[in-house]
Image (cartoon, rainbow, N blue to C red):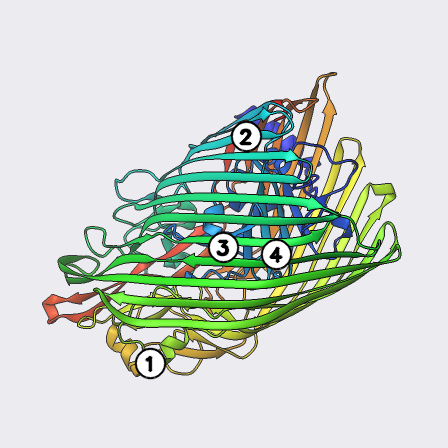
Amino acid sequence: MRLFSSVLLCSASLAAFSTPALAQDAETSADEAVPGNVIIVQARRRDEAVQDVPAVIDTVTADDLAKLNLRDFKEVSTLVPGLQLTTETNGVGGGGRLRGVNFDVSASGSNPTVEFYFNDAPITAGVLLQQLYDIGQIEVQRGPQGTLRGRAAPSGSITIGAKKPDLYAVGGFVDMTANDIGTLNFKGGFNLPVIEGIAAIRVAGVWDENEADRVRPIADLRDPFSRTKSGRISALIQPTDWLKLEGMYQKMDRKAFVYDQVASFSEANPDAVTGPLYIDSSDRRSIMKAPRPIHQVYDIFNWRAEASGFGQVLIYQGQHHKQKITGIEVMDEASYFPTAITQDTYSHPSATSHEVRLQNDARIADIFDYVVGFFDYKTDNPTVLTRPTVLGFPTSATTGGVFGIVNTAIERTGTSHEQSFFGNLTAHLGEGTEISGGVRRISYNSQNGLYVNGALTDTQGQDAKKWIYSASVKHNFSPDFMVYASTGSSWRPGINVVGDFSQRQSELEQSFINLPAETSKSYELGFKSTLMGGKMRLNATAYHQKFKNYPYRTGGRGVYYVDYTNLANPVVTQFNFVGAVPVEVNGIEGDIAFDVMPGFNIGLVASYSLGKIKSGVVPCNDLNGDGVPDRITSAPSLAQLQAAVGSDNLSACQVNQRSGFQAPFSATLTSEYSFAVSDHMDAYLRGLFNFFGNSRVDPVNVYDDVGSYGLVNLFTGIRDAKGAWEVSLFAKNLLDTTKTLTRSDPLFTSYRNVAAGGAAVTYTSTYTGVTTTAPREFGINVRYAFGGR
């Protein structure tokens, strides 16, 4: 290990950023080389060099994933500054954040800020934020989306394409990774032409076992554990030159036992009382009495047909995906009682999409490109859970006993149906100028219901129609220098937030649950350039975006409210309510890549984005009634909270603050230096450095500010000169940097004290919930490919 560390440290002098390697044409094999130093994308539903597209697009290819040993989809954010990918602790969902706004609401029938697509069809983020394998290309496009692809999204879209079968070559690959912190990861794929040139199949799979985030309990319990098994089979049939048929099925099964990480509140607040055991964030410990079990099962069915003729292409893309997710919510967060008390949750959502589009293959009159189509998307989001109310009594100042538990059965139903017609026209005026514009007409309908102990207690629905648009103009002053300006609008239906199951909701409370539709407008100005005969690329863009009714979710574990889930036994609970607020975002994004010499490249990608709420009304903790969010050091009792909020059940504040929880500035620096060891073997040194600027995670929580920090990943190894095999040693988070990324208010437990006539009691612990940077890992990766791969 000492020798390995020394080799990696020596490579640090060469470590810098390179932009992601060449992206492949989505219609070709992911291993087929693209001629020249050209990155090919399909951001506008046709093959284009990324330097020709008037938009900011980050690409990550199969080569990038392999070179940097990116095993989990969330690690893609290490190559895309400003992108944050997260999953919920209970395993139910996840999402992405871009361009200065925060959105991670577990809501029924809501559109996310960043939309995800798998094989050209929309899909829930939680299905994809899992183990990566046999991927051809990932494209991250920033800014409003929706006139060309699927659903409207104000901040961007992420498209993922699995590798497609090769009609001509037998081939495959195997890939193995092991590290010093308990990870074993095996991936493989095999391609077989069934009828050469006409039909082929491809199978691929992954088996991954690890220790999750390595957070361990202070009690004598099992270690954290996660195991993912997934397989995929794809088929391609092309009986004639004008007809192509594709189909894919993928199944993923993940089981995990994890713990919620905590730290002593006195770590951030020196005036706070230190508990019997001091826990630092770097200790990666939990006070849970039992692990949080998670079981996720995902099935994806994807199909496609293309017919071409007379210079036109007709495409039909369909997909159906379904999920079965079992998880729990910890209801005794302060670990006051001797045994674990949890809310058991089972969610089994499904969605089906269809898209038919017609577009030109050959340019019309040497001037026009067009795309027109129809899109249909249906979702069903049922969730059932059992919510406990604890009847207990104190046994000491820090512990209690359970007299009994009153369980409330909750069922949440939600369906949505979205249909739209869309069209886009691009005019190429001469050699240097292009004007493009598009529109989409959206028709949206949703219905949601809440059942408590079998009785329907609430229904919500909406029926809306909306136009959105996009337009851009670009001019090439030379083949190597392009300037562009673009504008676009976006619309998302009002959301119905899931998680507050109170049977006595106030008007104010409902305003933070059932929100109006959001609209936004964006303006962007940028340039793209190629310098030094193609050896250097320099791109930059500036943008301004303005939102109305942006759904801003409170940070941490949310705000305190009076919870009447069980009418006879109200208690104090925390929930991430959402406020519809006006937001303005301003930002700059840029990248530079330089091929210093054959075998040595450097690149830098950077993003700065600052979103601000402008006089918005948000849910807040305001026990003193001054209209300013409080600095919370302990949970209020039921009597204290009721005295402060009255019949509203919670407080509201008018604020001017950040709208995003991630660092406004972030940058990615990569580099690779390779050299020939012999005629058949190359050696390399590779570096990845991520920098994150200062951030205030939750603007009203003074204890969760994050100072700037950097993470270093280094790789070294040898490979076959023709790419048939590779052996790599790597170190992720080489310097073992531990940074507390989020910190909640002090954890608390609410219960009904049977020793005091059933009075509601709140116990506040000396610990807060935290998350930290990933632990350091040293590992080895071995890959072997043969044939068409």
Number of the label disc, if any, that sits on residue 648: 1
Do tag 4 and tag 3 residues touch (Cβ < 8 Å)? no
The disc, 3 or 2, on the residue closer to the chain's N-terminal end is 3
Number of the label disc, if any, that sits on residue 149: 4
CA separation in Å, label 4 and label 2? 27 Å
For disc 1, the neighbor class at 10 Å (few under 14, some 14 to 19, many from 20) is: some
Front-most of residues 730 and 579: 579
Q: What x and y, as percent, mark residue 552?
A: 49, 69
Residue 504 against residue 67 in the figure, above or below = below
CA separation in Å, label 1 and label 3? 31 Å
CA separation in Å, label 4 and label 3? 18 Å
The disc, 1 or 3, on the residue closer to the chain's N-terminal end is 3
For disc 2, the neighbor class at 10 Å (few under 14, some 14 to 19, many from 20) is: many
Q: Secondary structure at mark 3?
A: strand
Horizontal side, residue 544 vs residue 744: left or right: right
Horizontal side, residue 754 vs residue 88: left or right: left
Residue type at mark 3? Gly
Tag in front: 4 or 1: 4
Number of the label disc, if any, that sits on residue 201: 2
The disc, 4 or 3, on the residue closer to the chain's N-terminal end is 3
Do tag 4 and tag 1 residues touch (Cβ < 8 Å)? no
For disc 4, the neighbor class at 10 Å (few under 14, some 14 to 19, many from 20) is: many
CA separation in Å, label 4 and label 1? 42 Å
